[in-house]
Image (cartoon, rainbow, N blue to C red):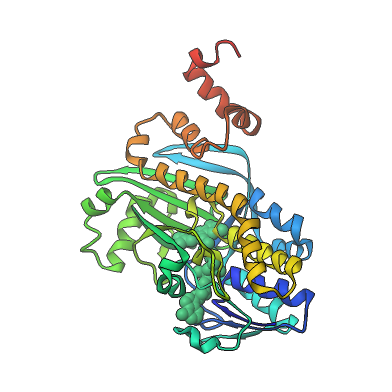
Amino acid sequence: MKIEILGGGPAGLYFAALMKRVAPSHRITVHERNPRDATWGFGVVFSDRALEFLRADDDEMYRYLTPHMETWQHLTIVHNDTRIPIAGNGFAATGRLELLTRLYDYVERLGVEIRFNEEVNDLAAFAGADLIVAANGAASWVREQHAARFGTHCDWRPNKFIWYGTTKAFESLSLTFRDTPHGVFCAHHYRYSPGMSTFLVEVEADTWSRAGFDRLSPEETMRHCERVFATDLDGHPILSNNSFWRNFPAIWNERWSVDNVVLMGDALRTAHFSIGSGTRLAMEDAIALHKAFAECGEDVPAALARFQALRMPPMKKIWDAANVSLRWYERMGELMKLDPWEFAYSYMTRTGRVAHEDVRRRDPELAAAYEARHPERFAAA
Ligand SMILES: Cc1cc2nc3c(=O)[nH]c(=O)nc-3n(C[C@H](O)[C@H](O)[C@H](O)COP(=O)(O)OP(=O)(O)OC[C@H]3O[C@@H](n4cnc5c(N)ncnc54)[C@H](O)[C@@H]3O)c2cc1C
């Protein structure tokens, strides 16, 4: 088969790897507009469970990617000056560029061609392809151009976020919430290499306006965030990588393919970064599309229909959880009025997928603190 893949992110690269590994005769080309050594953002985090899919489906890739990751076994919720470590939540993180570089090397060794610095803006460039994979991220022009045929829904969420990094190496995945005169600031921060951490700042829209971010330069914006999180940064600077304030688009598509063009990864659907699953979902899409081809051979329409049928149920569950999670952050100002333990408990149970029994198993101290505050609910237990 002749397969053209638009976008050299985790979705496109991993699909190329899976297809080429089992059928070296496929002619697969990945078209990536960025140079080999540049990407956006800093590190990405996977929850323990977010890596289990890889271990189960592709032990070779699991063993190839995971030894280079930073790992830790708990997360920390910081509510102003109260720190609450929560046990039983394993995580692993890696630099986005490091992850991509390892995937580039892997697919190139298999014989996939990656054309860097190649921006493709017209599918006519792929005439003669048996399959076109649009893995060009959340702002996919392929999806936007055929939005009616894909049945695209895009819900721009109100919170503002900016993806920074810092040289401070945090001990664990941390979510730090600080009251300021303008409103609550949240930082999602974690170490992704021995000397670097992701430091993503998120605020509600009103807080953003009150802080005057629409008038501040990029430099002033960084300095403002450094002042808010001075205690946490410990003198380390905030670093930018073309960082700017954005709103999160919650994207969904009713139909995942049109003719021989299929959407994958963030182009297909986005999952809020607060559940640390976007990369995992992108890679799971690649596994499912590959399985669909394994079942249907080179019958492209059948494989694309099978892909959607196979992938929809598990993906929808996580997508729904991500959308509940992002709404929790949209209420952070109100939630910060809770006492720190109640706040941490609310965070842990925010998606509805973690029940009280789960909290008890993972972190008995947090469960006990919550039970002590609500004796009426646990009187009979
Ligand atoms: C702020 C933020 C934090 C995140 N944190 C995490 C996290 O901690 N953990 C996690 O798992 N996920 C995280 N994610 C999500 C994760 O980054 C994405 O889900 C994942 O990268 C999706 O992979 P993808 O391959 O579908 O798309 P992308 O990684 O976006 O890759 C798409 C590629 O297509 C290329 N491209 C686009 N248009 C063109 C064109 N016209 N021509 C050629 N190339 C093109 C782009 O350059 C890009 O390399 C985060 C996302 C954001 C925004």
Q: Nearer the viewer, residue 328 or 44?
A: 328
- Left or right: where does residue 57 sit relative to residue 153? right
- Left or right: where does residue 214 sit relative to residue 35? left
- Left or right: where does residue 109 sit relative to residue 214? right
Q: Nearer the viewer, residue 52 or 154?
A: 154
At a point 53% along the width and 50% down the height, the residue shown is 275
Q: Quadrant of residue 80?
A: top left
Q: Quadrant of residue 106?
A: bottom right
In the rendered view, tell whether residue 354 sits above or below residue 100: above
Residue reaching furthest to the top: 380
Number of numbered discs present? 0
Place of residue 323 in the rendered image (x, y in percent of width and height, measured from the top left): 46, 48
Q: Nearer the viewer, residue 284 or 196?
A: 284
Q: Nearer the viewer, residue 30 or 225?
A: 30
**Residue 32 in view (yes/no):** yes
Place of residue 216 in the rendered image (x, y in percent of width and height, measured from the top left): 24, 64
Place of residue 121 in the rendered image (x, y in percent of width and height, measured from the top left): 44, 83
Place of residue 1 in the rendered image (x, y in percent of width and height, measured from the top left): 70, 82
At a point 51% along the width and 87% down the height, the residue shown is 117
**Residue 283 in view (yes/no):** no
At a point 45% along the width and 84% down the height, the residue shown is 122
In the rendered view, tell whether residue 272 sits above or below residue 85: below
In the rendered view, tell whether residue 44 sits above or below residue 318: below
- Left or right: where does residue 270 sit relative to residue 110? left
Q: Quadrant of the C terminus?
A: top right
